[in-house]
Image: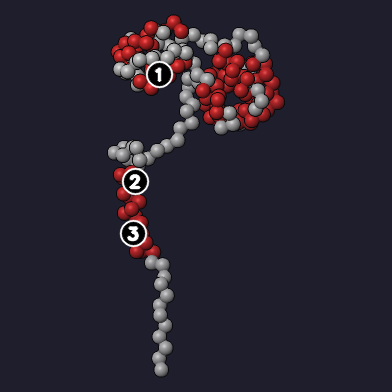
Amino acid sequence: MVITRERSPRFDFVRFCNLIIPIYLFYLVFLRSSIYPSIYISIDLSIDVRTVCVKVMEDIRATMTKEESRKKPDIEKAMGVYCARDDLSAREKKICYYIDPIKRDVAQPFSLGMPSLKVCQRITKQNPEICTVKFPVKTEKMEQKDLSKLRVKQLKQILSQRGVECTGCIEKEEFVKKVQETEHLATDEF
């Protein structure tokens, strides 16, 4: 009597590669390419150079020596001195109000030499209101053709920063006109 053993199914690496490689290439070529950019979504922390946080961090860094910028207690002291100044704008005072309770968390990446933009991105995770404080958009030097290049969403943001509501505005030209009419409201104060 002859005993035959059934072969156990084993992993065939060649077949696996022949199956996976074309799928991966399809993913790289079509899904991540610029042909279909809406499929590949990246997350943005909404911090840009216009934020007041970046300016405050750069101003604090400018008041310290290189040796002081490596020590956390010195960084915290410099933040306190900066925020106690009388010549700060309302927006800068608001950032100081937000970073005062989390000075230690701000000093940590600051002491490692992290750029101001990255420091602001990191502390925004703890207090998301920090990234909402931005400098007002100056439109006085912009012509109508430059304003018409902006999206309606951006025009609405400019108006909301100025505390103006465009009731009855439907067309983009109406929003552009309202932005030009309210240019005198674009001040540094709240």
Which disc, if any, is residue 156? 1
User: Label 3: how many residues lie within 10 Å, few (<14), some (14-19) or many (20+)?
Assistant: few
CA gap, disc 2 and disc 3: 15 Å
- Does 5 appear above or below 57? below
Do we see residue 33 in this rendering? yes
Which disc, if any, is residue 29? none
Is 183 situated left or right of 111 in this image? Answer: left
Between disc 2 and disc 1, the foreground one is: 1
- Three-letter amino acid code of the residue under disc 3: Leu
Q: Which residue is mark 2?
A: 28
Is 31 situated left or right of 128 in this image? Answer: left
Report the number of numbered marks. Answer: 3
- Does 104 appear above or below 134? below
Do we see residue 142 in this rendering? no
Q: Nearer the viewer, residue 101 or 120?
A: 101
Sequence-earlier tag: 2 or 3: 3
Q: Nearer the viewer, residue 179 or 65?
A: 179
Which disc, if any, is residue 19? 3
CA gap, disc 1 and disc 3: 50 Å
- Three-letter amino acid code of the residue under disc 2: Leu
Quadrant assignment, res 159: top left
Q: Nearer the viewer, residue 179 or 22?
A: 179
- Does 159 appear above or below 47? above
Q: Residue at x 44, y 12 (%)?
A: 164
How is the protein colored in the picture?
secondary structure
- Does 137 appear above or below 44? above
User: Label 1: how many residues lie within 10 Å, few (<14), some (14-19) or many (20+)?
Assistant: some
Q: Residue at x 66, y 14 (%)?
A: 84
* Residue 187, image x, y percentages: 49, 8
Sequence-earlier tag: 1 or 3: 3
* Residue 81, image x, y percentages: 67, 16
